[in-house]
Image: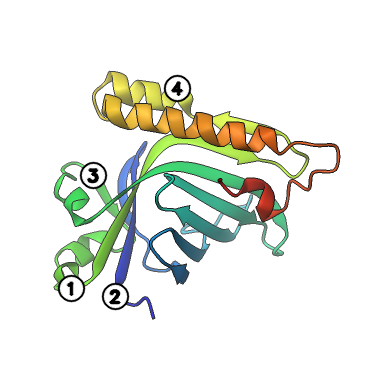
């Protein structure tokens, strides 16, 4: 059903473009894309997850699982959705998971190409309710050296701030931090 969609993840630290060809798209509309995926490289700490890209919110919220399928935590990336134009500015970028071959294939001009650029700021929600904010320093470094624009860092900071306010507003003594209802953006 979604076979003509090519999803990519653009990271700045490290500088890489990864074709998410093995991610299974479970649902897609103008508001959300839901995928199921396995870790690209074997990892001891987790095996994969289910991610929901909230396309108009700039959020990718992933439910992370261990090797036995048990929930570990929520991982929220602040992302910027772009189209195929994002593939034109990748000089010096490491192309991973078949991205180089895809970019030379006729599919590039036939598929709906979606690139999610990771704007570095991450929010982790642990099952005990602990919320961690990660990689603010990386966002600042990428701004300082000109890799990320002021506009993108501003978007990432405002998005993270708004999302944190949503999470904090949902705290109570009986909150289930493993529930998707807790992490859904407004």
Question: Which is more toward the observer, 80 or 146?
Answer: 80
Check contact, mark 1 vs mark 2: CB within 8 A: yes
Residue in the image at 18% along x and 73% along y: 110
In the rendered structure, the answer to whether residue 159 lies left or right of residue 109 reads right
* Residue that badge 2 annotates: 4
* Residue that badge 1 annotates: 110
* Residue that badge 3 annotates: 93
State which tag comes first along the sequence, 2 or 3. Answer: 2
State which tag comes first along the sequence, 3 or 4. Answer: 3
- Is label 2 or label 4 in front? 2
In this rendering, is residue 149 above or below 43?
A: above
Q: Residues within 10 Å of mark 1 (few under 14, many from 20)?
A: few
Q: Residues within 10 Å of mark 2 (few under 14, many from 20)?
A: few
Residue 172 image offset from top left, x and y in percent: 80, 37
Kindly state the secondary structure of the residue where label 4 is placed.
Answer: helix
In this rendering, is residue 114 above or below 154?
A: below
State which tag comes first along the sequence, 1 or 4. Answer: 1
Kindly state the secondary structure of the residue where label 2 is placed.
Answer: loop
Mark 1 to mark 3 CA distance (whole Å): 23 Å
């Amino acid at each position: 059903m979604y076979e003509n969609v090519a999803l990519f993840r653009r990271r700045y630290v490290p500088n890489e473009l990864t074709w998410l060809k093995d991610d299974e798209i479970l649902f897609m509309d103008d508001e959300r894309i839901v995928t199921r995926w396995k870790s690209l490289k074997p990892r001891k700490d987790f095996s994969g997850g289910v991610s929901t890209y909230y396309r108009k919110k700039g959020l990718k919220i992933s439910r992370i699982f261990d090797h036995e399928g048990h929930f570990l935590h929520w991982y929220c990336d602040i992302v910027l959705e772009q189209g195929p134009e994002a593939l034109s500015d990748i000089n010096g970028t490491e192309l991973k998971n078949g991205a180089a071959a895809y970019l030379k294939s006729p599919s590039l001009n036939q598929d709906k190409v979606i690139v999610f650029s990771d704007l570095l700021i991450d929010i982790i929600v642990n099952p005990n309710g602990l919320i961690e904010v990660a990689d603010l320093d990386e966002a600042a470094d990428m701004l300082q050296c000109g890799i990320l624009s002021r506009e993108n860092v501003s978007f990432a900071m405002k998005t993270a701030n708004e999302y944190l306010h949503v999470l904090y507003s949902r705290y109570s003594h009986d909150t289930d931090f493993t529930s998707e209802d807790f992490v859904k953006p407004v």
